[in-house]
Image (cartoon, rainbow, N blue to C red):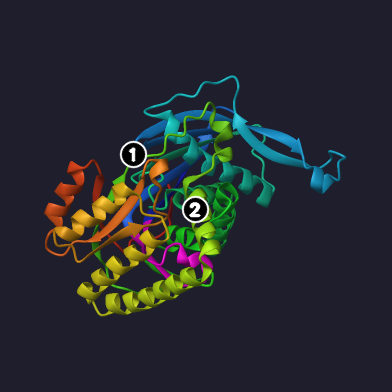
Amino acid sequence: MEKIRASVPAKVILFGEHFVVYGTRALAAAIDRRLVVEVSESETKGYHVKIENIPTFGLELDLDLKLEPDLEAGKGDGIFKKRRFGLNQNSKVRPYKDYDTAAEALAYVKGSIEYFEERYEIGIGGTGVEIEIKSGIPLSVGLGSSAATCVATIAVLREYFGIERDLEAIRRDAYNVENAVQGVASPIDTAISTYGGYVSVERTEVKRQDLPELKLIVGSIGRIPLSMATAAKASEIGLKTKKIVERVKGRRASFKRIFNSLSDASDRITEQAIRAIEERDFVTCGALMNVNHGLLDAIGVVPRKLSELVKVSQELGALGAKVTGAGGRDEMGGVGSVLVLPGESGDQIKAAMEIVGALVMGVQTGGEGLEILRL
């Protein structure tokens, strides 16, 4: 029985997060932590999904296809249908670890399947499809787990159903899924998951960058307790990134002139950082990371726990340290990740982060993008 496998990298945003939404530059990189999605024929009808080996949780369940009237397309006559997927009422969710946090990841799998069937007008009919997801990317901490899930799921479904392999089409489809599930999404995440390496974004234009590798430390804090009664309602959750972006938008509206000055500073930081990395000037790169972190703190996306990780890293001699990705909020548990350019004090920094309960990973930037295999 043939199996299709797609593997994609995690990402870190090195410079420019949040401000990129308003037209400034940002720089992101793939790192050597990956998510894998495999698709094969299933003995049961419909889509059978396994999510396992992701840090903190795993689950196994069945998704059933339901046809609902598309009132907008059919103008109320019920002729046109939309495909929607929900839990099979005759089966039980079978958790491996912690089902509460699994619901968010499932929202992206479910959204990818729904988008794929509607976009390409493909239905599986009486056959069954097995989807298995394994990952080394922690969930909801700013390392691109949602984009990785969307890219890999779309890629394997396209390959499984014989659609021509096209990286840009995969990236675009995955971005549409992530945007639909979250209500807002940056093109940078799906670009990194698809192409790997480094990418910069300016005014929604995504460009690949040829830059040398960086050895970094990522420290991640916590998880979001979703406490969902059923995974079918996962897409109704106010997702972490969306809430944080909306909060930043509110601050921008209240202090527009100040925010615009911060945006200009972020843009110049990213520009100088790209040049510093090109020249392997890691001291300057680290100093710019510290300044970028200060801007993120100013717009309210640095919760206390992440701030402590940054400060202890800087005190122990890191060349630079900053929040990466969306950041977090104290009322949401302070979850998120920090990025550290360690210099010569890497072991001390890792130990200090672990003492305060962070998940600590040594990573390297510039990893390979989407890889598709037939097994």
Query: Does any portion of residue 165 appear in the rendered image?
Result: no
- Residue 338, image x, y percentages: 30, 55
Which residue is identified by label 1? 55
Residue 217 against residue 108 in the figure, above or below: below
Which residue is identified by label 2? 151
Q: Quadrant of residue 197?
A: bottom left
Q: Image point 44% across, 44% down: which residue?
A: 37
User: What distance separates the C-alpha of mark 2 from that of mark 1?
Assistant: 19 Å
What segment is highlighted magenta in the picture?
11-30
- Residue 44, image x, y percentages: 56, 27
Does the stretch in magenta take in 24? yes
- Mark carried by residue 117: none
In terms of secondary structure, where does tag 2 sit?
helix
Does the stretch in magenta take in 272? no
Residue 187 against residue 96 in the figure, above or below: below
Q: Residues within 10 Å of mark 2 (few under 14, many from 20)?
A: many
